[in-house]
Amino acid sequence: MKRAFPILAILTAILLSYALYSALVVAPREQTMGDVQRIFYYHVPSAWTAFILFFINFGASVYYLIRRSTKADVIALVTAEVGVVFCTVVLVTGPIWAKPVWGIWWTWDLRLTLTLVLWLIYVSYLMLRRFSTSGQTPLIAAVLAVFGALDVPLVYFSIWFFRTQHPQPVIGGGGSIDPRMLHVLLLNWLAFSCFAALVCWSRYRLEMLHREVDEAQAMEALLQPSFVTGRNSVAVSQDKLRSTESAQ
Amino acid sequence: MSTAALTGATLFKDLRLEWRSKDAINSMLFFALLVVVIFSFSFDPTAEESRQIAGGLIWVAFLFAAIVALNQTWARELRNQVLDAYRVSPAPANALFLAKAFGNFLFVAVLECLMTPLFIVFYNLRALGPVWQLPIVAALGTWALVVNGTFFAAMSLRTRSREIMLPLILFPISIPALLGMVEATTSILTGEYSAKFWIVLLAAYDLVFTIASLLLFEPVLHAE
Amino acid sequence: MTYLYAAYAATWIIHIAYLSTLALRYKRLRDQVRELKAHSDE
């Protein structure tokens, strides 16, 4: 498994390069917006990837609540982190695209606002994980993730209706898409999905290693010789047990 | 003891304690008042404008004041290891949760009743829409804040910087409810739109998160 | 268009920044493992 990683990394890098080339050169120039429209090939796949990652986080959190599996907990953590990274990309490329095309950096339209709220929810999830002093952080985090996921449809409908009542410019509008553009879009999506999978895999291995090291350090602390008796705490407690048994 | 009886007993205990010390209510009231005054300096709206923004101002003030109440929800239980006593008792965890949630609801409701006349005076408010809808919006909105707030307060018990953790995790998830509350209130005050959609949204939000909280409270209570 | 390049650059800067933090944490873990191994050998 581990040997596959460098090969997959190189393949992904090639795929990403080809996707970039397609976005910049192969895809046809958009009529109204010009070359700036090509940001679309990075902005949209990042959004789709982020949403998929958050969905996996939801699944892993539910699985954790049912089965208490460590692997599920680590998957939840990993997908939330990488999801936030991709979500940040969406929130940064969005305004950079909007400014030259529509003249405004930001608008509280459905898509952008929903993305921002998702970002806020999952950043708060990551903060809870970081600040928690509980031994059952995975459980509490899983519960928060479930609450967050339940919230998403409610966020969607509330902003949708809000925008229906108070219409504003929609960034990135609808409409049909040229098949050549669709092809490049899907290619970039594939490339970024592979990239996301690899990053998640790395983060997963890192987290597993981190937990093993923590455990090993805890064991080491237990087996440290004490200053007074010159024997480690496990041996000391064994002594105590023996002396209480003989005293009875 | 049935769950309902247990909930009632715990709720009355909390209300009695609060009535004697009046800790939460006093700090909430004063905080809400301060927020109103500071907003007045920041915005200084005309009568026409106030109707547009009052909805938002009122609910932001109530939100911040509710955080004060929510933060102290479980603080009293942590002292003297009362929370541990609950955890080892055979009492259903939901009874405790509901008691705390209802208690908070009553505190915030009292705050709202006291603050609303003040808002009406400060901003010269007069509702142009159906006024009878306002208590419904207030009840649904307050429950939305309180049910999640009480639950998240329990979750943030075992965190560093507990008091800041609660708003950090509560606010993002409360966004649809906040939008609903503010928009419903503004619709009723200005009379320009119907608040029906927002009332339905708030009801749906309350339903979803009340059920989720009841289902998931027990493991959270027992997390150490 | 500068905006186009800014967007693409921003994307990769964000990704590279995250990957760098991962690499840093990995390096720190490796050091801890080495320390643990040294302690247990004593």
Image (tube, helix red, strand yellow):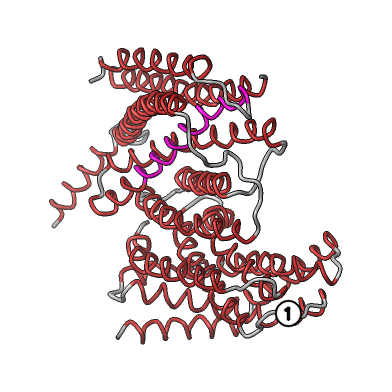
Q: Secondary structure at mark 1?
A: loop
Of residues B50 and A61, the one nearer the viewer is B50
Viewer-proximal residue among B209 and A185: A185
Q: Is residue A224 visible?
A: no
Residue A77 among those drawn in magenta:
no
For residue A196, side relative to residue A92 (left or right): left
**Amino acid bearing label 1:** Leu
Residue drawn at x 81%, y 66% is B49
Q: How many marks?
A: 1
Q: Is residue A41 magenta?
A: yes
Q: Position of residue A48 (x, y in %)?
A: 43, 37
Q: Could you tell me which quadrant the N terminus of chain B lies in? A: bottom left
* Observer-nearest of B130 and A207: B130
Q: Residue at x 81, y 74 (%)?
A: B123
- Seen in the picture, residue C13 relative to A102 is either above or below; the reply is above
Relative to B64, residue A98 above or below: above
Instruction: Point out the image quarter for the C terminus of chain B.
Output: bottom left
Q: To which residue does mark 1 refer?
A: B128
Q: Position of residue B99 (x, y in %)?
A: 44, 78
On screen, A138 above or below B209? above
Q: Residue at x 55, y 64 (%)?
A: B177
Badge 1: chain ID:
B
Q: Viewed as shown, does residue A116 lie left or right of B187? A: left
Using the image as rendered, state which of residue A175 and residue A134 is in the foreground: A175
What range is drawn magenta here? A34-57
Q: Position of residue A238 (x, y in %)?
A: 20, 42
How far across and down, in percent of the image, does residue A110 sit?
56, 50
